[in-house]
Image (cartoon, rainbow, N blue to C red):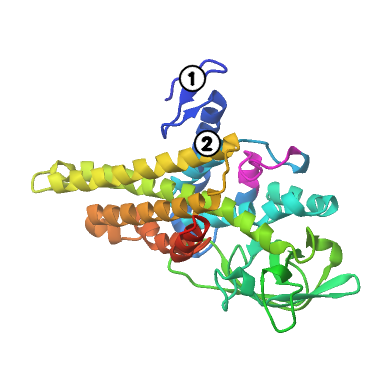
């Protein structure tokens, strides 16, 4: 058990970051929650392609869903280190799919928090943070992918409603979301597409004309992922988030937060792979000695640790800059490259862990096997690796 720190004194956390006693107490509570509520069930949930909706409310009760959100809407004001701790501890269960759906509000709510009217905020945010409603973000389309400026899903004004038509795909929590932060085309020159004509709308999940189709995936099995079809979906005009035709900048701002969260998740899952591989290597006997006694295994473990150390250092430096308000002109490039570096570390560590586990690494039920299947969605979601490099290069003037 970790020795308690004196009140007000900073202590060094599990991952080498200087934390306050409040951070450490929070880590302990989340770790206990994962051990009791998630870890015993996560394999069964993955095989069932779902997890209980009640988990949202249980997560809300210990403050996980409201972390970092305004207290006025049921949130708990907190610095970014609390979210980082939550990511590290939830990752211990070894399921990216669970993390993606349980926290899909962290990409669906920020535009509403930052730009929606007060009435819309109060209509949407409190129930989501309480775990009684689920929020999702719907931007991606089959025809556009990362090219947000070319999205086709449209919303036209008809009296006191927006009428939405079109499709979205690869939407996390898309099957059961009660609120969908939806990117639509509301303007632009006739026959042309571009960033200037995009808006965001908060669409209720029970809107007539909305149909949902589940999508089968390589990984993230327990996370519901859907294709959404909108046909004459009527949404009240006051569900517009921010100004009409001003959604593109909101989406880009939201991507920044999403990419930092994905980098944190990738680093955390890489650590899970290292821990499982090391534990296996210490127990597994080959040629009369523990697997870890073989030099080739030790070197592979040290390569994993080296990549983890560099990724974590970069991640923590970035979080520290954000907390200090030191977000300069190259911030977007930094987040893009960090996201790539972190997911590459996850990929390398997952591959190495499966190799060390050998046959067991190929068996369903090990964390490394699941994470190995989930690597690719991390390298694609939130902006594919190639897009990240191009965005970074453009911002850096290269």
Instruction: Please identify the quarter of the rendering in which residue 386 is found.
Output: bottom left
Q: Where is residue 207 in the image (x, y as percent from the top left)?
A: 77, 70
- Using the image as rendered, state which of residue 125 and residue 284 is in the foreground: 125
Quadrant where the C terminus is found in the figure: bottom left
Q: Position of residue 378 (x, y in %)?
A: 46, 59
Q: Is residue 89 magenta?
A: no
In the rendered image, the residue lying farthest to the right is 159
Q: With 101 as the anchor, is 57 left or right in this view? A: right
Q: Position of residue 29 (x, y in %)?
A: 54, 34
Residue at the disc numbered 1: 4
In the rendered image, the residue lying farthest to the top is 6
> Relative to 345, does residue 77 appear above or below in the rendering?
above
Mark 1 crowd level (few <14, some 14–19, many ≥20, 10 Å Cα): few
The residue sitting at 68% across, 37% down in the picture is 76
Residue at the disc numbered 2: 320
Instruction: Please identify the quarter of the rendering in which residue 310 is found.
Output: top left
The residue sitting at 27% across, 43% down in the picture is 278
Disc 1 versus disc 2: nearer the observer? 2
- What's drawn in magenta, residue-wise? 57-71
> Relative to 303, does residue 172 appear above or below in the rendering?
below
> Relative to 211, does residue 277 appear above or below in the rendering?
above
Mark 2 crowd level (few <14, some 14–19, many ≥20, 10 Å Cα): some
């Amino acid at each position: 058990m970790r020795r308690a720190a004196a009140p007000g004194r900073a202590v060094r956390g599990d991952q080498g970051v200087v934390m306050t006693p409040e951070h450490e107490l929070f880590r302990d509570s989340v770790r206990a929650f994962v051990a009791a509520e998630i870890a015993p069930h996560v394999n069964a949930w993955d095989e069932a392609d779902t997890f209980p909706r009640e988990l949202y409310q249980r997560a809300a009760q210990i403050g996980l869903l409201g972390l970092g959100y305004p207290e006025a809407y049921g949130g708990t004001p907190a610095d970014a280190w609390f979210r980082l701790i939550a990511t590290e501890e939830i990752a211990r269960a070894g399921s990216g799919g669970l993390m993606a759906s349980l926290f899909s509000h962290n990409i669906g709510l920020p535009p509403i928090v930052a730009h929606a009217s007060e009435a819309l905020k109060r209509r949407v945010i409190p129930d989501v943070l309480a775990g009684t409603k689920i929020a999702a973000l719907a931007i991606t389309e089959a025809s556009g992918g990362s090219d947000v400026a070319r999205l086709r899903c449209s919303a036209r004004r008809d009296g006191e409603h927006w009428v939405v038509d079109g499709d979205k795909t690869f939407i996390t929590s898309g099957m059961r979301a009660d609120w969908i932060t939806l990117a639509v085309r509301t303007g632009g020159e006739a026959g042309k597409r571009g960033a200037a004509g995009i808006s965001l709308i908060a669409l209720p999940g029970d809107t007539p004309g909305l149909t949902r189709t589940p999508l089968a995936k390589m990984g993230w099995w327990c996370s519901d992922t859907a294709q959404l079809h909108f046909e004459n979906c009527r949404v009240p005009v006051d569900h517009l988030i921010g100004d009409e035709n001003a959604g593109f900048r909101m989406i880009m701002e939201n991507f920044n937060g999403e990419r930092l969260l994905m980098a944190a998740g990738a680093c955390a899952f890489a650590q899970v792979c290292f821990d499982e591989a090391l534990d296996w290597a210490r127990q597994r006997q080959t040629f009369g000695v523990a697997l870890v006694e073989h030099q080739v295994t030790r070197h592979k473990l040290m390569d994993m640790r080296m990549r983890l150390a560099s990724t974590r250092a970069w991640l923590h430096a970035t979080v520290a800059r954000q907390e200090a308000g030191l977000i300069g002109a190259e911030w977007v490039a930094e987040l893009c490259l960090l996201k790539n570096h972190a997911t590459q570390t996850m990929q390398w560590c997952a591959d190495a862990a499966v190799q060390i586990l050998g046959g067991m690494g190929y068996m369903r039920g090990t964390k490394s096997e699941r994470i190995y299947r989930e690597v690719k969605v991390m390298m694609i979601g939130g902006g594919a690796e190639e897009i990240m490099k191009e965005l970074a290069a453009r911002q850096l003037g290269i």
